[in-house]
Amino acid sequence: MELLKSGNFQAQKRGVRVVTYDKPFYKKQDMQDLQNIREYIQETFVERGTRTTKKQLLSSKEKEVWTCECGKTNDIGVYCSGCGQDIYGFKQNEMKPADVDNYVGQKIGLISEYVE
Ligand SMILES: [Zn+2]
C-alpha cells in the first residue's frame, strides 16, 4: 500500500508486482486488506494516454487511436511504437493492473474457501 500510495509511478508499478507475492499463510483480515488494495489499484491506474479519432486515408470513416505520453499516436490495443508502453503507461513485460485485479480476485476467493 505504501508503494501504491507513493505518488511515484515507477514505485506504484513495483507495488502492483508486490501485490502478487504470496504470504506463507493467510488470515481472514487478509481478505479485507486485499479487497482494499484491489479497489485502490482500480482507482489509481487510469489511462495516461488520450483517445482520439483519426481520419483514414481513402475512407470517410474515422478510426479510434490513442496518443501516448511520449507524443506518438498508435492504434487502440497496441503498445506505443515510440516508447513501448500501453495506454496505461505499462510496458509489455510489466505486470498490468488488470492482471493483478484478476489475480487478487481469485486469491480472495481461495482464502474465503480455506480460511475460517
Ligand atoms: Zn509512447
Image: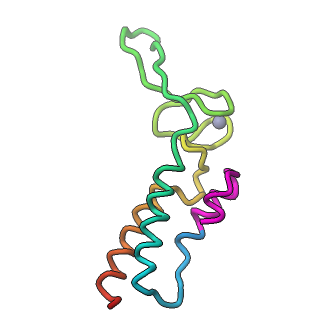
Q: Is residue 114 above or below residue 77?
A: below
Q: Quadrant of residue 26?
A: bottom left
Judged from the image, the quadrant occupied by ligand 1 is top right
As for residue 57 lying within the magenta part, the answer is: no
Q: Quadrant of residue 79?
A: top right
| Quadrant, the N terminus | bottom right
Choose between 57 and 78: the one closer to the eye: 78
Q: Is residue 73 left or right of residue 60?
A: right
Q: Position of residue 72 (x, y in %)?
A: 64, 28
What residue appears at the point 59 percent right and 49 percent down from the top-left corner? 90
Q: Residue at x 34, y 80 (%)?
A: 110
Q: Residue furthest left?
A: 113
Say if 43 sits above or below 87 in the image.
below
Q: How is the image coloured?
A: rainbow
- Compared across the picture, whether 36 is left or right of 74 comes to left
Q: Is residue 109 above or below residue 43?
A: below
For residue 53, above or below residue 103: above
Residue at 68%, 32% in the rendered image: 70
Place of residue 113 in the rendered image (x, y in percent of width and height, measured from the top left): 29, 84
Quadrant where the C terminus sits is bottom left
Residue 35, horizontal then vertical, whole percent: 42, 67
Report how many numbered discs are placed on residues in the image.
Answer: 0
Query: Which residues fall within the magenta stretch?
Result: 1-17
Residue 15 is a magenta residue? yes
